[in-house]
Amino acid sequence: MDSLKHSLRDITIRSISVSEMNNNVYLLTSKATGAQLLIDAADDLPAIQQLLKDSSADTEATPKLARIATTHQHWDHVRALEGLVAATGSSTSAGADDADALPVAVDVRLSHGDVERFDDIEISAVHLRGHTPGSIAFVYQDPEGLAHILSGDSLFPGGVGNTQNDPARFTSLMNDVTERLFDAYPDDTVVHPGHGLPTTLGAERPHLEEWRARGW
């Protein structure tokens, strides 16, 4: 299956699914400069390295992995992280409240609203508290099109992420997802979750009160 999912004005978005957990690994590549951001080195280092090789078709420049970002600390999202850092020498980032739990040193500890730029890839960090303390969604705004949210395990088609039946954690996550994603971005915004298929905010918005009422 072709890993190329979106060819936008300035960047491409590729993704592959790895492991028995069907984790999504995302790769953003600048068409002009070859700068790259990889989100969630979840598992299967050879498959991720092949993803990086495939992305050479997306730019006339030499691709260079500038950053490996991690949405949250859970083991199934970091199993290839140490190997990929060793193989590429890339810097790393993660939410400040999850960083110490990662298997590598984290170079940049992200807080809500932080904006990072890798040549013409500008990515915003959205802190979504509940699935883990430091879960981060990454948002790319296409200058001529839609916003793309790489939501980790905080938002999926059909609901928010697992909060282990903890009412306080669930309320926190629902509030953050509602205020920081649904209230901040339009319906056509594309959501790329940590597992499974993409969705849009518009497809999920009618169900917010249903999710809140059911408690998961």
Image (cartoon, helix red, strand yellow):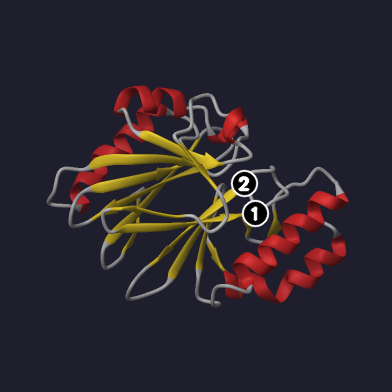
Disc 1: which residue: 128
Task: Decide if residue 162 is on the left or right side of residue 36.
Answer: right
Residue 64 percent location from the top left of the image: 24, 40
Residue 149 percent location from the top left of the image: 50, 60
Query: Residue 125, relative to residue 41: is it above or below?
Result: below
Residue 169 percent location from the top left of the image: 80, 50
Query: Residue 19, relative to residue 148: is it above or below?
Result: above
Task: Decide if residue 38 is on the left or right side of residue 132.
Answer: left
Is disc 1 in contact with disc 2, using a CB cutoff of under 8 Å?
A: yes
Counting other residues with Cα less than 10 Å from the Cα at mark 1, is it few (<14), some (14-19), or many (20 or more)? many
Of residues 179 and 202, which is closer to you in this image?
179
Amino acid marked by disc 2: Ser
Q: Is tag 1's residue or tag 2's residue first in the polypeptide sequence?
A: 1
Under circle 2, the secondary element is: loop
Counting other residues with Cα less than 10 Å from the Cα at mark 2, is it few (<14), some (14-19), or many (20 or more)? many
Q: Residue at horizontal 26%, vertical 54%?
A: 119
- Quadrant (top left, top right, bottom left, bottom right) of the C terminus: bottom right
Q: Residue at horizontal 64%, vertical 52%?
A: 154
C-alpha span from label 1 to label 2: 5 Å
Query: Residue 90, relative to residue 208: is it above or below?
Result: above
Task: Decide if residue 160 is on the left or right side of residue 148.
Answer: right
Disc 2: which residue: 135
Report which quarter residue 12 is drawn in.
bottom left
Amino acid marked by disc 1: Leu
